């Protein structure tokens, strides 16, 4: 099993969700996060007050899929989240040791 | 045990109580009395004590023992007795106490003291019970204050756990505000106070039947009214649908909750001596119409509501001004008068001035909530009836539509994010914004998807009926029509993409409307549920706001009215057309006629809280500075200013100014003198510096000024944005600094907010943008002018 963690542009969330549902992935965790990569933020002046906007609003998406599906899911995800501009985000893929469904103790792929 | 039918709750509760009584009595006769014929009695307490045993509720028993020594002796027979009842299927909770223990205050476990309020003798030593029964009332009388205080504290904690709202989409009908626990609370408070409990028989019957239904449905003590349970309950009650049936639930819960809050407030008020002093002081707020007493407002002559329907509006103005709710009796009088009030408000009436005042006062949300509670809001706007307790079933909304609207008003009155609080202080007249918020979701009553169009259909005739002036109506219409657009852009648009700001700017057209729409969006999202407005979302909305704001400031100079439009306004910034009504434009055209004959046209008019100067003349150096300086020399305080010029060099300046010394108000001839002086100064017949020589020097400036230049913002001019501490003559000093550098002021937008001046100038030098050297030199001069 693989855990796929993606930090994407907030306005791409709906598109990414739809694309993932299109290939049959419907379980995911979504978090509102702030951060920056190489796309550094900047200071903004509004009416004489300076607002620090170095941390940009992003969406973090986490999902765990079977090994067999991981590549396809990453491809779909990046395809839907891409605008080609700086700030599109990143995807990280991790190994998952075990998955357990709390309700009935299902393990492994069947717990996903 | 067999469960009785749910449709007749009173019978069901009584029957189960009787069945349990006989079980307990039999078990006691078999197991207790043979072993211990005296010194022990069995009492029913809590819900069982008051003969209200729901199908699967716990059975609360109190085993009253003469002494701790007796308690030791009866340990064995008592556990055999309890075991038998357990085995018979009862969920028991019991305690063993001596009469002395029962007459002690248990601050940590006040529920024990409270359960005795419903005690009832079942079986055993009558002598022992008689002694206890004699002692109990004395104890309750002596300790009623701490008991009430603790009871109120527990209730407040419970209400807080549910956000102090009875309007939850999946309520727990026992614990949620307005549930059975609150009904019981009212009875306990009345009992402790030796007073009559408010009659809530209908609500109790509804809730009791519902609890029986939920118990029978789940086969256990289960009190959560889930969506599935709502579907089944609606069928059981033969209602049109679950949403309709839930409105019944909410109306009953509302009745109980309001009564509970009233009683809690009065309990707490009695407990605080400081409060009594404050309350006595507040009674001085009484006037010819209203009396204030015990932190409530009464109508002095209640029946005058019949002849004077506007008294209802004045009452809520009073509420909005002082934050004091109407007394229950007054609310009842209003309820009686509702049919007549509805008839009166159904006719077109100039209600808007009174409503605007209510919406502009500090306690507007409380006033609107009281208007909603008393039904007066629906009398004024029957269009609102459809959202009363209206349920919208989805994962995000925690509240019914009417409650969402009231919560949103509360958020708007007091934004907890400082950026939005500041933005609110920049709004001149918040009343149309609040009014838009009041109506933004009324269309949800129709339940057919597009609630925006439905809200507009309902709102616009209502606003015409209360005779809201057309410009305000237009603003409200715009806000309702666009109320989803910023949140849609937050979700689906790239905020870094300039097209997002451009599209939003094209939609809102003016900075004023942008601010109002941003605040409306902030309040609307915040009121979806208590955690909906995360700091993350507040940040995203703010970024959308600032990007659009900068876009609008940028286009101020760039976007011009095309020359195909009538001569005078052609070449003015498009903002001119967006911020002026046809009547105002016609008046400006008339002024332009005068200018053609006399070289200048000046008009001074009085506004509700300020004056407005409109001036049309040919552009010349130092023009804007001269006008600003002349106003300052008369002691006037400039609040806002705009200067527009067209291609022919005709200039339209408008200044909104306050008259802090009431010079113009008390001396009407001074208006003529001001007008004449302005004409002389503008036409170069008098030197403004001489006029200003006599004015006192302003105080030292405390806040550092910010002066920023932007040559990218516009194609043909340099943008200067200045934020500085406001003082008399500031605008004159800034404008003359710009003019003395040989720069021409193309467009000006001046605003003030709480001692701070926010000035935007678009300037050119020799028809072009400023060079780096010119910027450096002018920057120094402006900094110096700010600090003068």
Image: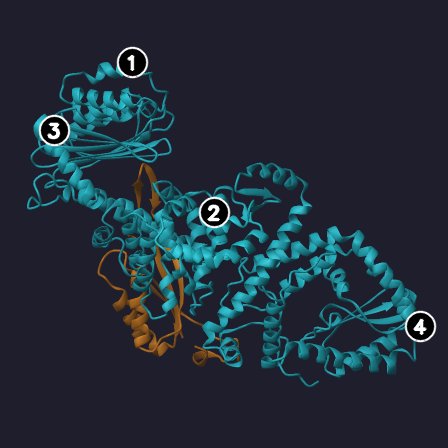
Chain colours: A orange, B cyan
Which residue is found at the position 50% from the left and 50% from the top? B305
Q: Nearer the viewer, mark 1 or mark 4?
A: 1
- Evaluate whether label 1 is on the same chain as label 3: yes
Say which mark, if any, is on residue B311: 2
Q: Quadrant of residue B382?
A: bottom left
Q: CA distance from mark 1 to mark 3?
A: 27 Å
- CA–CA distance in space, label 2 to label 4: 68 Å
Q: Which residue is mark 3?
A: B619
Percent x, y of residue B38: 93, 72
Vertical comparison of A51 with B526: above or below: above
Earlier in the chain: of badge 2 and badge 4, it is: 4
Q: Position of residue B657 (x, y in %)?
A: 29, 30
Label 4 in the same subunit as label 3: yes
- Is disc 4 placed on a helix, strand or loop? loop
Provide the secondary structure element on which disc 2 rests: helix
Viewer-closest of A111 and A52: A52
- Chain to which mark 1 belongs: B
Task: Report whether residue B713 is seen.
Answer: no
Instruction: List the residue tagged with mark 4.
Output: B38
């Amino acid at each position: 099993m693989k855990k796929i963690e993606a930090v994407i542009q907030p306005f791409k969330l709906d598109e990414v969700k739809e694309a993932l549902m299109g290939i049959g992935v419907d379980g995911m965790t979504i978090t509102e996060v702030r951060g920056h990569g190489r796309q550094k933020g900047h200071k903004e002046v509004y009416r004489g007050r300076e607002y620090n906007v170095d941390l940009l609003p992003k969406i973090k998406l986490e999902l765990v899929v079977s090994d067999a599906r991981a590549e396809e899911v990453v491809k779909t995800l990046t395809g839907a989240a891409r605008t080609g501009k700086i700030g599109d985000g990143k995807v990280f893929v991790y190994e998952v040791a075990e998955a357990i469904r709390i309700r009935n103790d299902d393990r492994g792929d069947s717990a996903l | 045990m067999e469960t009785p039918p749910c449709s007749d709750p009173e019978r069901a509760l009584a029957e189960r109580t009787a069945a349990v009584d006989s079980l307990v009595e039999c078990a006691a006769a078999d197991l207790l009395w043979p072993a211990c014929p005296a010194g022990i009695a069995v009492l029913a307490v809590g819900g069982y004590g008051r003969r209200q045993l729901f199908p699967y509720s716990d059975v609360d028993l109190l085993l009253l023992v003469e002494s701790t020594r007796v308690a030791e002796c009866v340990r064995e027979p008592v556990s055999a007795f309890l075991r038998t009842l357990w085995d018979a299927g009862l969920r028991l909770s019991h305690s063993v106490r001596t009469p002395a223990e029962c007459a002690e205050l248990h601050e940590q476990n006040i529920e024990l003291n409270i359960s005795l309020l419903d005690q009832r003798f079942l079986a055993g030593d009558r002598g022992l019970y008689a002694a206890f029964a004699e002692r109990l009332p004395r104890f309750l009388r002596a300790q009623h204050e701490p008991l009430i205080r603790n009871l109120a504290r527990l209730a407040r904690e419970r209400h807080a756990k549910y956000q102090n709202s009875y309007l939850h989409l999946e309520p727990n009908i026992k614990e949620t505000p307005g549930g059975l626990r609150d009904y019981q609370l009212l009875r306990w408070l009345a009992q402790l106070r030796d007073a009559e409990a408010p009659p809530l028989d209908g609500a109790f019957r509804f809730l009791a039947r519902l609890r029986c239904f939920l118990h029978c449905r789940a086969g256990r003590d289960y009190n959560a009214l889930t969506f599935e349970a709502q579907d089944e309950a609606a069928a059981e009650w033969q209602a049109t649908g679950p949403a309709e049936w839930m409105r019944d639930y909410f109306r009953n819960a509302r009745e109980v909750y309001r009564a509970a809050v009233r009683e809690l407030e009065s309990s707490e008020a009695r407990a605080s001596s400081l409060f009594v002093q404050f309350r006595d002081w507040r009674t001085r707020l009484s006037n010819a119409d209203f009396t204030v007493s015990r932190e409530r407002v009464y109508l002095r002559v209640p029946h005058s509501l019949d002849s004077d329907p506007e008294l209802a509006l004045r009452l809520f103005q009073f509420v909005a001004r002082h934050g004091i709710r109407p007394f229950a009796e007054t609310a009842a009088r209003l309820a009686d008068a509702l049919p007549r009030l509805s008839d009166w408000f159904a006719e077109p009436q100039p209600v808007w001035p009174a409503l605007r005042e209510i919406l502009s006062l500090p306690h507007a949300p409380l006033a609107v909530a009281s208007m909603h509670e008393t039904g007066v809001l629906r009398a004024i706007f029957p269009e609102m009836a459809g959202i009363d307790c209206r349920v919208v079933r989805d994962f995000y909304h925690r509240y019914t539509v009417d409650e969402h609207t009231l919560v949103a008003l509360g958020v708007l009155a007091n934004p907890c994010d400082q950026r939005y609080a500041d933005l609110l202080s920049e709004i001149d007249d918040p009343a149309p914004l609040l009014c838009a918020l009041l109506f933004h979701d009324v269309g949800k009553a129709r339940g057919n998807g597009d609630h925006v169009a439905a809200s507009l259909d309902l709102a616009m005739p209502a606003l015409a009926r209360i005779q809201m002036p057309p410009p305000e109506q237009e603003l409200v219409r715009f806000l309702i029509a666009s109320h989803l657009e910023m949140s849609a852009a937050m979700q689906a648009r790239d905020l870094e993409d300039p097209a997002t700001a451009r599209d939003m700017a094209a939609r809102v057209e003016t900075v004023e409307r942008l601010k109002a729409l941003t605040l409306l969006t902030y309040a609307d999202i915040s009121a979806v549920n208590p955690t909906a407005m995360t700091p993350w979302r507040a940040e995203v909305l703010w970024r959308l706001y600032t990007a659009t704001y900068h876009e609008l400031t940028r286009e101020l100079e760039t976007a011009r009215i095309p020359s195909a439009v009538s001569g005078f306004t052609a070449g003015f910034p498009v903002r001119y057309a967006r911020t002026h009504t046809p009547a105002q434009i016609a008046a400006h055209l008339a002024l332009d006629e005068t200018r053609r004959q006399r070289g200048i046209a000046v008009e001074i008019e009085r506004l509700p809280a300020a004056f407005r100067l409109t001036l049309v003349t040919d552009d010349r150096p130092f023009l804007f500075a001269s006008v600003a300086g002349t106003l300052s020399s008369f002691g006037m305080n400039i609040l806002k200013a705009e200067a527009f010029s067209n291609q022919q060099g005709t200039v339209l300046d408008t200044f909104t100014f306050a008259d802090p010394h009431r010079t113009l108000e008390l001396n009407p001839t001074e208006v003529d003198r001001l007008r004449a002086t302005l004409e002389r100064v503008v036409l170069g017949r008098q030197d403004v510096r001489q006029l200003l020589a006599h004015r006192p020097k302003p105080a030292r400036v405390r806040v550092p000024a910010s002066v920023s230049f932007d040559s990218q913002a516009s194609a043909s001019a340099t943008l200067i944005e200045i934020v500085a501490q406001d003082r008399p003559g500031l605008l004159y000093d800034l404008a003359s600094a710009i003019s003395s550098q040989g720069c021409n002021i193309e467009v000006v937008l001046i605003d003030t907010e709480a001692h701070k001046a926010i000035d935007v100038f678009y300037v050119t030098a020799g028809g072009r943008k400023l060079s780096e050297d010119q910027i450096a030199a002018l920057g120094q001069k402006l900094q110096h002018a700010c600090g003068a």
